[in-house]
Amino acid sequence: MIPRTMLNFQIRRSIATSHLNSRSSVEAIETKATYYQEQIDKYQDDEKPSNWNESKPYNSIPGPKPWPIVGNIWRFFYGEFKGKNMAEISKHLRNTYGDIVVLNKLIGIPDKVFLYNAEDIEKMHRNEGLWPQRDALHSILYYRTVLRKDIFQDKPGLTAMQGQDWFKFRTVVNPILMQPRTTIKYVGQMDTIADDFLRQIHRLYEINPEMPEDFELLINKWTLESITFLAIDKRIGCLEDHPTEEIQTFLASTVGVFKQMYKLDVLPSLWKVYSTKDWKLFVKHMDFITNTLLKYVDEAFQSVKDNPEIKDKFNKSIFDKFLELDRKVAITMAIDMMTGGIDTTSKTFAATLYFLSTNQGPQTKLREELKMLMPNKNTPITAEILEKAKYLKAAIKESTRLAPIAVGNMRKTQKALVLSGYQIPKGVDLLSGAIALHHDDKQFKDSKKYMPERFLRTTTCEYSVKNTNPFVFLPFGFGSRSCVGKRLANLELEIALAKIVRNYYLDWKRPEMKFNTTLIYGTADPLRYHLRAVED
Ligand code: HEM
């Protein structure tokens, strides 16, 4: 018998080191996954932690008391949660009930246990098991597994899969998306796309140095252009002066689909009971995105077939590698990359621009670093420049501290745990209170202050992030289920931010920005920052 720890190690190693790019490799993963499933089944225990019996029962965890029939749902309409977004509700729960809080009886939504104690969050992740589980958005799940089963079949995508199926898919995708050498290969292309983004910013600047009301739409165009290039090797022309009608609809659908997911998955909605207007609009957007991507993937597939130039291993793109696996993997991943990589990267970028516009000290330091690394305003960005740009990276990290895209990280318990002295059975949804902790002075000194220095290795004072439990700050999640696009997102963000700050002084002349949570957390007011060109 293999001890559980050894089994965990073997599987983690296999996820981390697989270099799989052929059908036989996929079969090998199948065999391996089945083997590991058998081993895991043997060890699926319902055993309880040793301190279980001395711990307080689950139903005594503090939290708002549900009312008969209406449970706790009424609080969102008339009670303490009315008008609050999820970030505010999370902070309110902590302030009112303490470091562990249960929000239950939400009618059709499983209980959520909020964790505000770093040790509990660490325990949640350390016990997440080999195949960590995070609930999928039900709208996406239904669309992919029922409505468009014709396309997704047994592969509804990383965001929607669980258990062994998720493991197999993730094992195939990890070496393609997560290796540093993949990221390096795309520096030049991302630099070119960022140049087009900058050209559009310059056009706006010439009209008015204060950016327009809908500036975030331009950010969305840039992230969409970048992610489609990364996913399917195609420049779709979002950043051109006059994008085609197809691209305009594609962009509108990607923006629209996130709005619909918020209405269907976060706000109370009857779409599971009958086909509401919001559901129909969601399906319309999803169909347009899926069908357009299908068309692009098939065109690219055909062109690879017609021009079978032999590329060496280093020159193969992400898309080449997906296609080598099969067309379905390429489509599923393109859609997953769109779903996971547009709003998240856009909102992080918007927040970073806002924080730099309102914090001239850090902005000047960043520009000084960039001037050293990029002697000319249009010096192309290289991997070496990015490697050396420590303040640039710190500036982005500090934005993800003040404005993380997720209110917290979620995991379903894979076995019984004791957290803060309470019994937590297997199968309960735990949610870390990341935003509440990121904004807590006990975790980060002067937590409201934008201070990239916190993330510099050279900082040793009380502001350093080294003083904080690392499980408090996990903007891309944790472990084997963490963000698969982390490296690509950082690449996009670093290149575009370096270009903007090297070329323009940023300023903010409007009232303080509001932040809000819809599907994700981020800037809520128009990003109307001012620009002034840097001369040298
Ligand atoms: C700044 C930008 C981004 C942030 C802050 C972010 C953050 C996250 C977080 C917090 C998770 C959940 C991790 C966990 O549960 O441990 C996640 C998952 C995911 N992200 Fe990202 N993300 C970003 C950009 C991207 C990009 C560019 C892509 C596209 C390649 C992407 C694709 C995904 C996918 C597919 C998952 C699901 C992974 C799985 O369940 O196996 N993300 N991301």
Image (tube, rainbow, N blue to C red):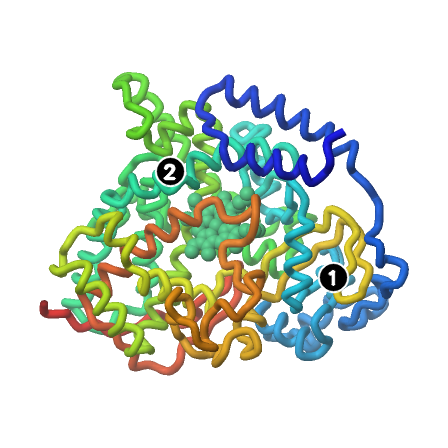
Query: According to the image, label 1 marks what residue?
Result: 106
Type of amino acid under label 1? Leu
Residue at the (22%, 63%) spot, across then down: 370
Q: Is residue 288 above or below residue 74?
A: above
Type of amino acid under label 2? Ala
Judge: label 2 CB < 8 Å from ligand 1: yes
Query: According to the image, label 2 marks what residue?
Result: 231
Residue at the (69%, 50%) spot, across then down: 127
Secondary structure type for disc 2? helix
- Quarter of the image with the N terminus is top right
x%, y% of residue 202?
17, 62
Point out the frontmost of discs 1 and 2: 2
Is residue 256 among what the camera can see?
Answer: no
**Mark 1 and mark 2: span between their CA atoms?**
38 Å
Q: Is residue 526 above or below residue 3?
A: below
Is residue 7 among what the camera can see?
Answer: yes
Taking depth in this image into account, of 248 and 31 the one nearest to the observer is 31
x%, y% of residue 70?
79, 66
Q: Is residue 19 above or below residue 272?
A: above
Residue at the (14%, 54%) spot, across then down: 379
Taking depth in this image into account, of 295 and 379 the one nearest to the observer is 379
Secondary structure type for disc 1? loop
Q: Residues within 10 Å of mark 2 (few under 14, many from 20)?
A: many
